[in-house]
Image (cartoon, helix red, strand yellow):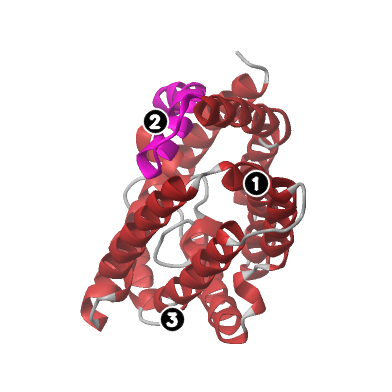
Amino acid sequence: MLTGITKNTRLIFVVSFILIIGACSFKTFYNRLDYLVPSYVEGMVSLDEVLKEKVEQRTNVLINWHRNTQLRQYADLLRTFQKDLASPLSEERVLQHMASIELLWQSLKAKLDEEMAGLMPLLNKAQRKELFESIDVKNEEFYNDYVDLDQDERIEQYTDTLFDSYENWLGDLTEKQEKAVEKATLSITSIAALRLQYRKFWQHSIRQILDSDDATENKTENKSERLRLFFDSYKYNNQPELAAATKANKQVFAGLTAEIFRRLTAEQKAYFITRTNKYITVFTELAENR
């Protein structure tokens, strides 16, 4: 499960983490995912040799799918962002970009769910216990980092995150842009507690499926199918309270982004073009396996 102060931060800045580590570093990072992903999984649960081999195999399938289907779309999206500099960026246009990012994320999530549904039923009882203990630890970390905050701490966290994200794209913000960020953070609705609630529901549901004693002959396949059905039906935004808060936050982020881009300096525009050009090149080269 992904962490973050809100789902909308992920939607707007889904590529921002790339800009933090630099184009060359990201290319190296991406080309090592076949090692890093299995290592991350092994940090959650101990794998025997057979399961380790399966995780490595499915990781390569996932990476190849992502390389061949999504990287060029990232590059195209950045080109679209560049074209928007030619005219004032509207809130509606930002929402359209957010919808495009959402579609990319949902496509990736569906592929991840498919791989998890195939691998999770292969865990034995001890491995399942270890996995859910690891998830409990991550839930506790999520609670400490994003839920157990007073209002001032939460606003400071939102502000710092937004400053970092915008500055990674644009360079230093102007005083007016900084004040716009500070003002917008006062309107953000925290959804961390709701997300944690549904994270735990997700955890409980898949544990029930994995721990069930299937009477069917092909119980592994049956559990995989049940997991697929659950993943398909499990959506945060199916929850009315969370959906309403998410929609409101999207409007805040869209309005803020539009305002900041309308106030871009010549230096910020040049910075944005230079940075995005680097990643258009990187995404294209990775898609071509170069």
Query: What amino acid is found at the position of numbered circle 1 in the picture?
Result: Leu
Furthest toward the top, the residue is 290
Query: What amino acid is found at the position of numbered circle 3 in the picture?
Result: Thr
Asked whether, in this view, residue 10 is left or right of residue 58, the answer is left
Q: Is residue 165 magenta?
A: no
Q: Main secondary structure of the magenta part?
A: helix
The secondary structure type at the circle numbered 1 is helix
Asked whether, in this view, residue 74 is left or right of residue 215, the answer is left
Residue, x 67% and y 60% (percent of image)?
A: 231
- Foreground mark, 1 or 3? 1
Asked whether, in this view, residue 281 is left or right of residue 189, the answer is right
Q: Is residue 30 magenta?
A: yes
- Residue position for label 2: 22
Relative vertical location of residue 272 with respect to residue 194 in this rendering, above or below: above
Relative vertical location of residue 14 with respect to residue 154 in this rendering, above or below: above
Nearer to the camera, 36 or 43: 43
Q: Quadrant of the C terminus?
A: top right
Query: What amino acid is found at the position of numbered circle 2 in the picture?
Result: Gly
The image's mark for residue 189 is 3
| Mark-to-mark CA distance, 2 and 3 | 31 Å
Q: Earlier in the sequence, mark 1 or mark 3?
A: 1
- Residue position for label 1: 108
Relative vertical location of residue 282 with respect to residue 124 in this rendering, above or below: above
* Residue 215 place in picture, x, y as percent: 72, 58
| Mark-to-mark CA distance, 1 and 3 | 26 Å
Magenta residues span: 24-49
Nearer to the camera, 282 or 85: 282
Instruction: Name the quadrant containing residue 202.
Output: bottom right
